[in-house]
Amino acid sequence: MENEQISAFGEVLIFLIGGCVFVLGGLFSSKLIHPHRPNAQKLESYESGEQPIGSGWSRFNIRFYVVALLFLLFEVEIVFVFPWATVFGNADYIEATDGLWGWFSIIEMFVFIFILALGLAYAWVKGYLEWPKANVTPSDFKSPVPQGLYDNINKKYQSTKS
Amino acid sequence: MQEKLTAITGSMGYFLPEIAIVISLVLLLIAGLFNAGRLNKLYQVLALAFLAVTMVLVVGQWQEVGDLVRPLPLFNNMVQLTSVSVFWKMICVLGAFITVAMGFGNQDFKDKSSEYYLLAFGVLLGAHLLVMANNLLTIYLSIELLSITAYILTSFSFNAASKEAAVKYLLFGAAASGVMLFGMSWLYALTGTLTIDDVQFLDGLIKANALPFTLAAIMTLAGLLYKISAAPMHIWAPDVYTAAPTPVAAYFSIVPKLAGIGILMKWMMVINLFGSSPVNWTIVLATIAMISIGIGNFSALWQNNVKRLLAYSSIAHSGFLVAGLVAYSETAYKAILFYSAIYLLMNMAAFLFVNHAEKEWGYTKVEDYKGLINVQPLLGVALVIVMIALTGLPPTGGFTGKFLIFSALWDSYVESGNDWSLYLLIFGLMNTVIALFYYLKLPYYIIFKNAEQKPQKQLIFSLQNFIGFFLVVMILLSFFKPDSLMRIINSVSFAF
């Protein structure tokens, strides 16, 4: 039962416990020493300094999920390419295997990146990267302000900008 | 380092069918990037060609493994090549071939056809890896590959019912694989290795306490039972089979299920621990088999939808396959292989004809088949033969398959005095009588009822009907001359 691999999990356990202790310790110590004087403004949920409107549980566009999935593509790539890069050029390995290690790992990585790139190409061709604009119907509201005033303002700021 | 690398590169030569599947998957994906709506037929032809290549490679492997004495470990023993696994691979590729030959029927979503075929390849790859798996991690990953592709395929009818079925399948599958993974983590904690035929693994399990071992083994078993849709993990099957496209339902009833049986056979040999297991697995398996057969048959009695009926029938067939595991002997395992091969023939034939009737005439209910024999005598007779085969009556291979399973059960009762084999035998025989009622419902409507509205007389020549009639001939042949199939199965060796 005494096994090296299992005892290696002890280190992971220490990390887990350490993480919990740091987070809980921070929260607990701030609870101990911080002043406690709430008012209505302080208890409001923070929305970049704006007055929050409506519920925080609003729905959002399903396209965000597609984007999140596409993000995974790059995420997975970086997760595997980083550790690979640290051992790919290892001179000892290459020497020990007579160069086979280098060829093996570079071919593996090319195959991996090729398949991931194919995933991106697929999403692109099938149009999942496009973000169709909402079709806004103009209202028939007649503004009492003449169009000329807007044009003047636009012209004025355009000139100052450039 | 050197040995590891040469082991990996050396394994590649024995991994050709799987590499072929991956390459075909990638090529289909690339082909799918071009104007998918119009190239529908091309993808089917491509997929069939790739499957034919894979089949050739698998048959090549069959000749290679013929003179293997011991299982051939590949990729540092992550997978193992044995004659049994090559047999399962042949069955899986054959199932995939027939499924792809049925085509992608959905006319409104033609631009999704390349995805359809490549997902079918994904399922096939998962099945191939699963039957060769020799490591808990490989088992888990290949089951996930099988399942995730299957969830997506379920939704390929693109209607509300199929989306609902897919979500149910996904949720249930996620729970089942979670339970299985938890069980595997216990097994790892008990043994310190993931390789299931390792001495360390078996030693660890023999030394382990009875309770954690039993819990872990049962949790792992649950995930496998889910894949073969045996009770009590069968709940997803009827909904999925009804709502998924008919070819997909046919595919699910063959490839994931038989791959699951393949790994279950191996898994039962492992957790039996050379007979020193604290649990009497024959009782557990016999109960599972009885519940599956019972639930499958009794629920099928009330079904009106043909696909739903076939779904319950496939649950019952899983029960019969598990019954072979109860007998637990070399002959019993060979009987399972025989039964699986016959099951492939008859279930695929049934789905081929049901698919034809659904696509051409819109038949979904049993009543729709009224008087089919007057209009399409050939198709009617073929369907009647398939239904007789599914019941397990002579003169069809279905009878031979059931007979072999039952005689293996009887042998195990006589030789080892295993009472549960006898109970299961009696229960199975009784259920065959019950099965008669619902399987023969379809022939009854086809032959003895007259249709109010008859479909137009039309030619029924198509690739899929041709395959269907070929399968029917094979079903009959496997009863009269089962020796060629038996010869193939007899050259398979199990490590008992």
Image (cartoon, rainbow, N blue to C red):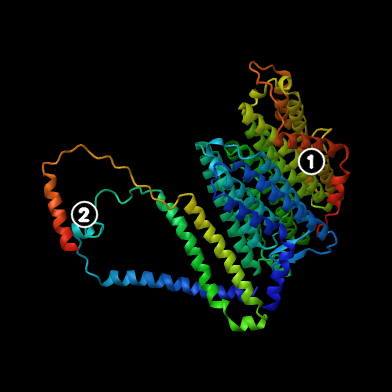
Is residue B423 in sight in this rendering?
no
- Mark 2 and mark 1 residues within 8 Å of each other at the beta carbon: no
Left or right relative to A26: residue B214: right
Q: In the rendered image, which residue does mark 1 sit on?
A: B425
Q: Secondary structure at mark 2?
A: loop
Q: Nearer the viewer, residue B284 or B434?
A: B434
Q: Quadrant of the N terminus of chain B?
A: bottom right
Count of labels shown?
2
| Label 2 Cα neighbours within 10 Å, binned few <14 / some 14-19 / many ≥20 | few
Counting from the top left corner in percent of width and height, residue B299 is at 64, 33
Which one is nearer the viewer's eye here, B429 or A119? A119
Q: Chain of mark 2?
A: A
The picture quadrant where one finds residue A156 is bottom left
Please name the residue shown 70% across and 18% down the image: B449
Alpha carbon of mark 2 to alpha carbon of mark 1: how far? 73 Å
Label 1 marks which chain's residue? B
Give the answer, above or below, for where B419 lies relative to B161.
below
Tell me: residue B377, above or below residue B49: above
Residue sitting at 63 percent across and 26 percent down? B361
Residue type at tag 2: Gln
Q: Position of residue A18 (x, y in %)?
A: 44, 74
Going 65% across and 79% down the picture, which residue do you hit?
A99
Indicate left or right for A70 with B116 as reference: left
Secondary structure under badge 1? Answer: helix
| Of B27 and B216, the residue lying toward us | B27
Q: Is residue B160 left or right of residue B350?
A: left
Q: Which of the labelled discs sits on residue A51, or is there none? A: 2
The disc placed on residue B336 is none
Q: Looking at numbered disc 1 in the image, what kind of residue is underneath it?
A: Leu
Name the front one of labels 2 and 1: 2
Measuring from the top left, give residue A109's x and y in whole percent. Answer: 57, 68
